[in-house]
Image (cartoon, coloured by chain):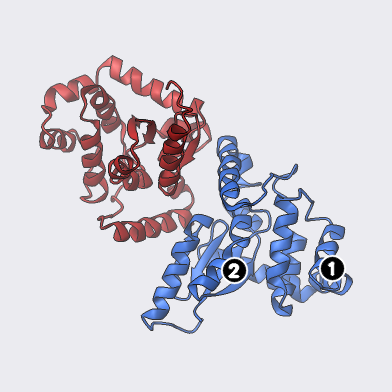
Chain colours: A red, B blue
C-alpha cells in the first residue's frame, strides 16, 4: 500500500479533527498512514512566535473556535477549547514517539486528542496520560519511563527538525511519498487522492 | 434569494480562486452574491504585519504557491505568482467599490484577478485597469476619475473598517445573513450551504 505521512502536534485543534478521521479515510483510499508526532513550538519560535497564532491574533483565534465547532458538529464530534490553550503536548509527543515503535501510536493519539478537546483534560498531566495508556492496554509506568529516555527525546527532536527541513510550518500536515506537502485538515482528502493516484501511475518511490 | 457577502482583496491569491468560481457556485445554490472589495493592508498592519504573511513566513509562502498551483490545475485555471507580490490593489479596490454602485463589479473583479494571476500584469498600473474597463464595456476615464473621488475613497475606508469590526482577518471571507463567518476559498461551499439552509429554515433576517 502507498503511504502518507501524517504530521501532527498534540496542541493543535485541526490535528484533532484529522486524527479522529484519518484511519477511516485512509482505509477507504487504500493508503497506509505513517504517524509523525512532532512539536510545533520550536518551528513557531523560529518565526518569532511565542505562542499559538490563535492567541497572537485574537480574531483568528475566535474564528478557529467557530470553524472547528461547525466541523465537529457535522462530524458528530464533541469539541471544546481547553481552559488553557495551547496545552503543552511535549509529554504526549514523547509517548507517541515511543508508541510508533511499540505499535500503539494510533489508539494513543486518538485518545489523547479526545481527552484534550472533547473531555477538557490536561494532557501535560502524567496521571491523565497514564490513564490513557492503561485504557488502551499499555502498562503506564514503563511507557512513561521509556518516553522520558534520552533516545526518545532525541528522536522527537530529530523529527521536529525534519519537519522544519521539509517545509512544514503548521499542523496537521500530510506528506506524500513523492514529497508533495498538504497543510490542514481540509487538505486530507487531496493528500489521500494524490497518494492513491501516485500509486496507480506506478511511480512509487522508496520512502 | 438569500445573500452571501464575498469579502475579497485584490492582492490575495486565494481570493482569485474564489472570484473565478463564486458566480457559478452561487447560481447553483440559489444564492445572491454581495461583492465586498476591501483592503487587507490596514488589517494586517493592525496586527503588526508590514506585508503579506506569505512573505513574512517563507515556508508558508512556498506552500501557498504550490497549493494554488494544484487547485488551479484541477479547476483548469492558469496561475502564476506575479513578479512583485503582493501587488498594490488600492486602485483596483476603489474601482470595484465604484463598480458595485454601477453594476459591473463582477466582470471587473474577475478580469482584474485574471490579469494579475493568470497574465502577470501589474494591477496598480492605471493603463492596465483602463484596458480592463474598456474590455468589459465601461468607459475608462470617467470610471477612473470617479474611483479616485473622495466619496469612493471614504466608502472603501468604511468597508475596510467594517471588515475589521466584524472579525475579518484574511481573504477571501464569506459572511452569511445570520453573521456566520467563513474564511478561505475552501470554505466557500460551506458558506453557500449554510446560506441556502438558513433560507430553507425561514430564518432570513434583514441584511
Residue holding disc 2 = B23
Which residue is rendered at x = 85% and y = 60% of the image? B126
Q: Pick whichever, B160 or A199, lies toward us.
A: A199
Instruction: Examine the rendering and report whether any part of residue A171 can be seen.
Output: no
Q: Residue furthest top?
A: A151
Residue holding disc 1 = B134
Chain of the residue on which disc 2 is drawn: B
Instruction: Examine the rendering and report whether any part of residue B175 can be seen.
Output: yes
Nearest to N terminus: mark 2 or mark 1: 2
Q: Do the dots labelled 2 and 1 sit on one chain?
A: yes
Judge whether B172 appears above or below A200 on screen.
below
Label 2 neighbour load within 10 Å: few <14, some 14-19, many 20+: some
Query: Which part of the image, by quadrant, shows the N terminus of chain A?
Result: top left
Label 1 neighbour load within 10 Å: few <14, some 14-19, many 20+: few
Chain of the residue on which disc 1 is drawn: B
Q: Secondary structure at mark 1?
A: helix
Q: Position of residue B47 (x, y in %)?
A: 57, 51
Q: Position of residue B78 (x, y in %)?
A: 67, 49
Which residue is rendered at x = 37% and y = 35% of the image? A6
Residue A171 quadrant: top left
Left or right of B71, for residue A150 = left
Q: CA distance from mark 2 to mark 1?
A: 22 Å
Q: Position of residue A33 (x, y in %)?
A: 33, 33
Q: Pick whichever, B146 or A194, lies toward us.
A: A194
Amino acid at each position: 500500500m502507498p503511504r502518507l505521512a501524517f504530521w501532527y502536534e498534540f496542541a493543535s485543534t485541526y490535528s484533532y479533527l484529522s486524527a479522529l478521521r484519518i484511519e477511516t479515510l485512509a482505509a477507504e483510499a487504500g493508503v497506509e498512514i505513517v504517524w509523525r508526532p512532532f512539536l510545533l513550538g520550536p518551528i513557531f519560535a523560529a518565526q518569532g512566535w511565542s505562542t499559538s497564532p490563535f492567541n497572537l491574533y485574537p480574531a483568528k483565534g475566535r474564528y478557529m473556535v467557530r470553524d472547528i465547532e461547525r466541523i465537529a458538529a457535522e462530524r458528530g464530534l464533541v469539541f471544546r477549547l481547553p481552559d488553557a490553550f495551547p496545552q503543552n503536548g511535549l509529554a504526549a509527543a514523547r509517548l507517541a514517539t515511543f508508541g510508533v515503535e511499540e505499535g500503539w501510536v494510533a489508539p494513543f493519539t486518538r485518545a489523547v486528542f479526545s481527552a484534550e478537546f472533547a473531555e477538557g483534560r490536561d494532557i501535560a498531566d502524567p496521571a491523565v496520560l497514564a490513564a490513557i495508556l492503561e485504557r488502551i492496554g499499555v502498562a503506564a509506568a514503563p511507557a512513561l519511563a521509556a518516553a522520558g529516555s534520552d533516545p526518545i527525546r532525541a528522536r522527537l527532536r530529530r523529527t521536529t527538525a525534519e519537519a522544519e527541513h521539509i517545509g512544514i510550518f503548521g499542523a496537521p500536515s500530510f506528506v506524500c511519498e513523492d514529497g508533495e506537502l498538504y497543510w490542514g485538515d481540509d487538505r486530507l482528502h487531496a493528500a489521500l487522492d494524490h497518494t492513491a493516484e501516485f500509486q496507480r501511475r506506478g511511480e512509487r518511490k522508496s520512502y
